[in-house]
Amino acid sequence: MMRELDFSAAINEALRQEMRRDQSVIIFGEDVGFFGGLFKCTDHLQKEFGEKRVRDTPISEGAIIGAAIGAALGGLRPVAEIQFIDFVGCNGAMDQIFNQMAKMRYMFGGTLKVPVVVRAPCGSRYPVASGAAQHSQSLEAWFIHVPGLKVVTPSTPYDAKGLLITAIRGDDPVMFIEHKLLYYVRRVPTLREKYPSMICHVPEEEYTIPFGQADVKREGKDATVIATMMMVHKAINAANQLAKEGINIEIIDLRTLVPLDKRTMINSVKKTGRAIVVSEDCKTGGVASEIASIIMEEAFDYLDAPIKRVSGLDVPIPYSPILEAVAVPQEQNIISIVRGIVGK
Amino acid sequence: MSDDFERLSKKTLVDLYTKMLKIRKFEEKTAELFAKGFIPGLVHLYIGEEAVAVGVCANLRNEDYVVSTHRGHGHSIAKGGDVKRMFAELLGKKTGYSKGRGGSMHMVIPEIGVMCSSGIVGAGIPIATGLGLAIDVKQTDQVVACFFGDGASNTGTFHEGINMAAAWKLPVIFVCENNLYAISVPFKKVALIKNVADRAVAYGIPGVVVDGMDVIAVYKAVKKAVKRAREGKGPTLIECKTYRFRGHYEGDPKKGATYRSEAEMSDWEKKCPIANFKTKLIEKSVLTESEAEDIIQKCIKEIEDAVEFAMESPYPSPEEILENLFV
């Protein structure tokens, strides 16, 4: 039987089930308690688990991550929320992430483990809401650059639940990045009409999805489109359009950036001979650049065309929807790039 | 110097003295090894500040936590660390506490509660708050001692970490080792407030200024704070006024006399926490001269043996480079 959940509800269910299963799981962050989180991912959790395990923090991002690290060292499994990923730059939070959390296990010779999950919403909310420059960024490339962090980038409610449970049960620090547009699907019917793949069946029971296993969203022979998070849904729409023109693309949803499922990606490119990497973050030094380099190193001989990146423009996210639509990749960008390299 | 010894047992007093001495001898040997080129990285020595770590840790149980700093050798020894494995870490050996991955600034010893040692000034403060949070959730009666310097008291994490610990009444003792300088910059030039401890008012917690050259004074102040923490009444900010007798790091020209006056340095050296405490112990007949000498000789022997262990220990092999990045 189909049991449809949206993204926030799937996150919420994963958190609730893990908190019921394991007393050491705690949640804290800004407005996560009484208010249930800005995007309702922690709704009703404080009511069920109490104020000791679900805490509203002061606006202190450095202390949120720092305290999560300390709590993990003290034997808990904290899930800390940074309200918008843009705020990892605030108040020393980034120091706690990349100088402390990421490095501790290694620099202390493997004597400690730091099982922290940091949940952080990213991305542009066009066409639902204009977040402008400081509430819309995609910063996942920052975290893949720092050894010691696992970086999870789910695209569907099903994946979000299974990957979050894996993150909480694992013993390594995880940046769990959630694309904000995925939260809005129930509230905004036009969004659901446009991206039907954003809601899906989510089993009620607990399940885990291993890190480092990409998901082939659609099989095809003409080109491989590699994407994460919201870009997966845009790629699916693009694929539907292209299919009408006789172009069949294969879509690989990476699901986790660290660890990275190179094999699925490379095997697909070897089959199709063409690769397009779609990523919402800014093009320069972005995720797509890294993926493209890996393909060049490991599948060059199989390529029939240059690898293409479809990425965000190198500008801050602008406020006006007319501009914001141009700043981040849209289906049309994917379609025209695919047409260009497939040459049909 | 506080001479209120009456209520402390001979064992406690001798332990305080022995621990301080062990730190001093460890650090003197470290300076020597560094000068001879055996230590590949930088070292920040604790010489002059021994009364702080020892006075604090004498109040702690094995399972209590310590959060340390870049100037952390003293904290580890005071909490009960093995000097063999500490020297091995300084030398980058596989037998070191961090298997040669951390060095001077990054030694942790989870089995005795030394849980974090960061080279980023101020970064340990919110981590200590988190350890306190774990204690609060698990409802044990452990406490956390969080060491940091006057420099750290001007970081944002000082504010965030202490405020959060205060708001949640977490069992953390925030110990500011105010040695008056953040590398070369005097505290009085970068803060208008006289005492770091005065900032406790802003968090609604007790703030205490104590003579950091007096191990008994530190011990007593921390005793109160630990009691308060164990009773669930929340954190205390304790500022220990102290001084480093060496430079910021080994190699700091003229032991820091470029930014500190010779007069100031020699005034503080007269306050040596170890020499003065030894005099008191002998005056008060807690120790005889020969007992004191015996302690010194034992200490020197332990340090010599530890260096030998470290010198003979193997280095990690290059094939191990990727080990322990993830669990």
Image: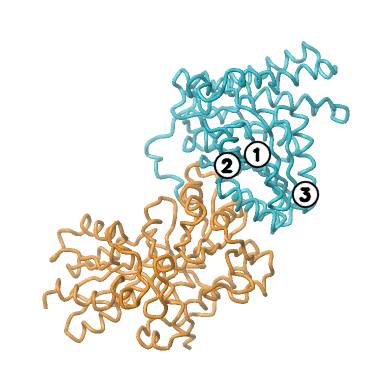
Chain colours: A orange, B cyan
- According to the picture, the residue beneath numbered tag 1 turns out to be B176
Real-space CA distance between mark 3 and mark 1, rounded to the nearest whole angstrom: 20 Å
Dots 3 and 1 on the same chain: yes
Seen from the viewer's position, the closer of residues B173 and B131 is: B173
Among all residues in the image, which is located at the extreme left? Answer: A343
Give yes or no for contact between labels 1 and 2 (Cβ–Cβ under 8 Å). yes
Seen from the viewer's position, the closer of residues B201 and A81 is: B201
Question: Circle 2 sits in a helix, a strand or a loop, which is it?
Answer: helix
Q: Position of residue B317 (x, y in %)?
A: 40, 34
Q: Is residue B315 visible?
A: yes
Which of the two marks, 3 or 1, is nearer to us in this view? 1
> In the rendering, which numbered label is found on residue B230?
3
Q: Earlier in the sequence, mark 3 or mark 1?
A: 1
Within 10 Å of the Cα at label 1, are there few (<14), some (14-19), or many (20+) other Cα atoms?
Answer: many
Q: Earlier in the sequence, mark 2 or mark 3?
A: 2
Give yes or no for contact between labels 2 and 3 (Cβ–Cβ under 8 Å). no
Seen from the viewer's position, the closer of residues A116 and A202 is: A116
Q: Amino acid at mark 3?
A: Arg
Q: Quadrant of residue B270?
A: top right
Within 10 Å of the Cα at label 3, are there few (<14), some (14-19), or many (20+) other Cα atoms?
Answer: some
Real-space CA distance between mark 2 and mark 3, rounded to the nearest whole angstrom: 25 Å
Q: Amino acid at mark 1?
A: Cys
Q: Position of residue B108 (x, y in %)?
A: 57, 40
- According to the picture, the residue beneath numbered tag 2 turns out to be B152
Measuring 42% from the left and 78% from the top, which residue is drawn there?
A129
- Chain letter of the residue carrying label 2: B
Which of the two marks, 2 or 3, is nearer to us in this view? 2
Seen from the viewer's position, the closer of residues A241 and B202 is: B202
Q: Position of residue B15 (x, y in %)?
A: 75, 27
